[in-house]
Amino acid sequence: MQGWKVLAQGGGGGRISRCPGGLIHLDYGNVTLRFTEEDFRAFAAMVEQAAANLNGAQLLKGLATWPKDVAATFSKN
């Protein structure tokens, strides 16, 4: 994948990459989520909050909130 940059890779085939067009692609199994960088950062903050709640940790004030105009594209690989 020329021009692609792998940002993170995990078990089970999960991968987060940036394509030459600048979008962030989160691939997990046969699902791909595509985000702008801004939307991906908001999504990552939301996942961080969820992970903290799973562990029973208190959420810190001032964490990024999910913007109302976030758009994500779902596609099948």
Image (spheres, grey):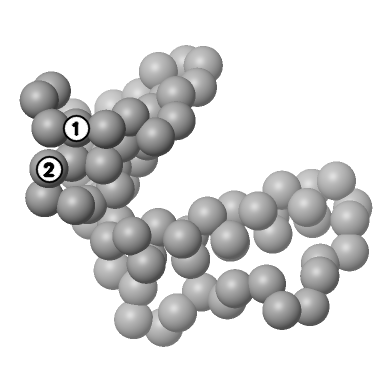
**Up-down: is 43 above or below 61?**
above
Q: Is residue 3 visible?
A: yes
Q: In which quarter of the image is the C terminus?
A: top left
Give percent across and percent down for residue 55. Answer: 85, 46
Give percent across and percent down for residue 14. Answer: 42, 25
Q: Residue furthest bottom?
A: 68
Q: What residue type is labelled 1?
A: Trp
Question: On the rendered structure, is 41 left or right of 39?
Answer: right
Crowd around label 1: few <14 · some 14–19 · many ≥20 (10 Å): few
Q: Name the residue under label 1.
A: 4
Point 44% across, 24% down: residue: 9
Q: Can residue 72 be seen in this view?
A: no
Would you say the residues marked 2 and 1 are in contact, meaning their CB atoms lie under 8 Å apart? yes
Q: Which amino acid does label 2 sit on?
A: Pro
Question: On the rendered structure, is 43 left or right of 63?
Answer: left
Question: On the rendered structure, is 51 left or right of 59?
Answer: left
Q: Is mark 1 on a helix, strand or loop?
A: loop
Which circle marks residue 22 in the picture? none
Q: Mark 2 points at which residue?
A: 20
- Residue in the foreground of this view, choosing between 22 and 43: 22
Q: Which of marks 2 and 1 is nearer the N terminus?
A: 1
Give percent across and percent down for residue 17. Answer: 30, 36
Tell me how far mark 2 sits from mark 1, CA to CA: 6 Å
Crowd around label 2: few <14 · some 14–19 · many ≥20 (10 Å): few
- Location of residue 20 by image quarter: top left
